[in-house]
Image: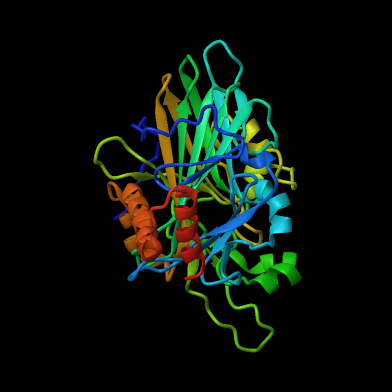
Amino acid sequence: GVARRAAVAVPRVARERPIALAAEPEGGRLLGDGRYVVPDFDSRKPFASFLPGVGGEWGKPMWAFYVNRGQGVAAFGVENKDGPLLEFEPANKAYADASFKGFRTMLKVSRRGRATELAQPFFAPDDARANRTMIVGMNELELVEVDGAAGIETRVLYYTVPGEDFPALARRVTFTNVGRTRAELEILDGLAKLEPFGVNSGMLQAMGRTLEGWMRVYHCGRAEDSAVVEKAACELPYFKLSASTADSAQVQAIEEGNFAFAFAEPAGGEPAALLPMIVDPDVVFGRDTTLRAPEGFAAAASAAALAAADEVKVSKTPCAFSASAASLRPGASATVTSLWGRAESVAQLVDDVAPAALAPGFAARKRAEAVALTERLTAVVRSDTANPLFDAFSRQMMLDNL
């Protein structure tokens, strides 16, 4: 069974001690653990790279393409670009679109004696009030933004999940109150566009709006496939086409699907609980089809109220935003973890994937496994020269050419 709850409050949790990011050299620097720090990453010359598509001996791999714009990840999926959760675009287009179509975080920050402020970490380019840093590892990507005006530090960490019978990308977002007073946060976090299983690159480019006629969100309160009909947000949405799209007399059923779900990492060893996922982009963005301004979120009383709104879950490209809240004293943190991947069926998602992810310590354990996996794969070219940057470069080149 999957742990559930009605409330969406994110508990305060202890966070890992972050690296110090003050006074970075202009050109970046190599950390002792082999990761590379890129300060002011989104104001630098554009670059692109991939997280390695490795899942270990018994896992299923997922690829992820990232750029130094927005929140990094610009496309990801299974096998190749014909199996996307986030549509693949070449780098020249991804540089422009990553901030809008990719991962987004939206905050309402309230403090005593101050008006509520709407913030979108990593969104506005060259934001003078924000200090941004990218930290690149062989099998992980971390972004940090310190918003001095809102008094909130946002850390986003990505890594692929190894050693499981489902492919998935893990995303951990940690919010820290760096202000002097208690901060009340309303939080939306997720993808502005998520492609259902069954689409491919050619369909997305050539069919566009027509293809949306087959798009459905299952296990999400629709009468077609749910015992309980509910128009509001759901906790374990399952995204796929309703049937094959080929122009033929024979129609094939589709069982596999993409999934997205999120949970607050609790303090202590208790299991995590699922957060509601908003799947209708119109609920979040309202009339703004550019996906720039979250008009729906701005007008809502809270993230929980937005999650309770009626949604359209058919015939449009869905989004996937978790809704939560946090109350942070100065220096306190809260973490929301989300998993994005593919399952063979709704039953696998409900009975296997979600319970595994909600088990205590899953997120931290899988990060350690992901880092250890690439360390082991590149150990054959490990060197210890007078130039640590060369040593790290050699291992990365080995990984890129596996």
Residue 222 appears at what percent x and percent y?
52, 58
Q: Is residue 62 visible?
A: no
**Along the line of sight, which residue is nearer the eye, 208 or 26?**
26
Residue 185 appears at what percent x and percent y?
50, 28
Residue 11 appears at what percent x and percent y?
37, 32
| Residue plotted at (32% across, 62% down) | 351
**Along the line of sight, which residue is nearer the eye, 98 or 107?**
98
On screen, residue 8 versus residue 100, left or right, reads: left
Residue 272 appears at what percent x and percent y?
33, 44
Q: Is residue 43 above or below residue 119?
A: below
Identify the residue at the far front of this view: 386
Identify the residue at the far bottom of this view: 249
Q: Is residue 214 above or below residue 310?
A: below
**Along the line of sight, which residue is nearer the eye, 115 or 48?**
48
Q: Is residue 40 visible?
A: yes
Model colouring = rainbow
| Residue plotted at (33% across, 64% down) | 163
On screen, residue 58 versus residue 391, left or right, reads: left
On screen, residue 315 versus residue 140, left or right, reads: right
| Residue plotted at (55% across, 68% down) | 197
Q: Quadrant of the N terminus?
A: bottom left
Q: Is residue 222 above or below residue 156?
A: below
| Residue plotted at (43% across, 65% down) | 167
Q: Is residue 331 above or below residue 347?
A: above
Identify the residue at the far top of this view: 113
- Picture mark count: 0
